[in-house]
Image: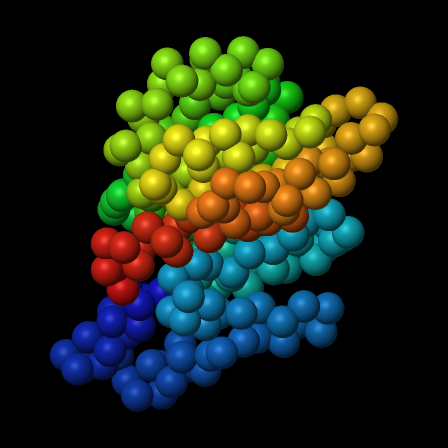
Amino acid sequence: MTPRKIEKILSQLSRGDCTVAHAMEQLRMLPYEDLGFAKLDHHRELRKGIPEAIYTPGKTERQILEIAEKTLARGNEAIFTRMKKEQFAKLSKKFGKRVRYYREANIATVGVSGRKLIGKVLVVTAGTSDIPVAEEAAVTCELLGCKVERLYDVGVAGIHRLTSNIKQFRAADVIIVLAGMEGALPSVVAGLTDKPVIAVPTSVGYGASFEGIAALLGMLSSCSSGIGVVNIDNGFGAGALAAVIVKNKHSVP
């Protein structure tokens, strides 16, 4: 339930275009709708400015379709993360243009409308292998109303690739930095800018990187200030945090 949706209902009620009973029916499912296997948080957009987010792995096809159906029936929005293209094909077949898929980010949206883009988030990766998680972060930021720039494959193995693009740091409100291996890049970026840095360890690297644990510990142990660290491969969490920072900076309700 978005602020725009509630404003529309109240405006219709004030003009006499709908009955009190109809308005009550539209608002009845605040703050959530119990589906038995899931409790849809219809209030989240109004409360946090972020639509209901659904982690797709572990859910059945029937559960995914029902969540999407209930979301659309209420005129709400939802973001499905880590969705496979085969799963989206089922959504698309049933709901058509009301759903959309971002292949590189493995994100699907249900009923999500375009937002006016504000601020700027810079998404930086150490390597090309970090791009799938980076796209999850970047697309999340865009869906939540932020302008996004991408700066990929600028890791410490060739630091000149990063330093030649420092001018992009100045235009950003917040910088998301993704790295696997030893996870050094966020420390370097944070040492070169006064912008807040959100570090995302990725599960990229050889055996001793322990599927991102080495990068996570390196980022948590950084000597550079101004870094916040999210969990391994958590592109959505990084994007959501960046969007909250941008919205608060630009005072968007």
Give whichever of 228, 37 is nearer the camera: 228
84 vs 34: above or below:
above
Identified at 39% across, 56% down, the residue is 244
Identified at 45% across, 47% down, the residue is 226
Give whichever of 169, 57 is nearer the camera: 169
Query: Is residue 116 shown left or right of residue 201?
Result: left
Badge count: 0
Query: Is residue 190 shown left or right of residue 136?
Result: left
* Horizontal and vertical percent position of residue 217: 70, 43
Q: Quadrant of residue 82?
A: top right
* Horizontal and vertical percent position of residue 18: 26, 79
Identified at 63% across, 59% down, the residue is 66
* Image quarter in which the C terminus is found: bottom left
Q: Quadrant of residue 178?
A: top right
Query: Is residue 91 shown left or right of residue 23?
Result: right
Residue 175 can be seen, yes or no? yes
Name, please, the residue furthest toward the bottom: 20
Residue 235 can be seen, yes or no? no
Give whichever of 102, 167 is nearer the camera: 167
53 vs 139: above or below:
below
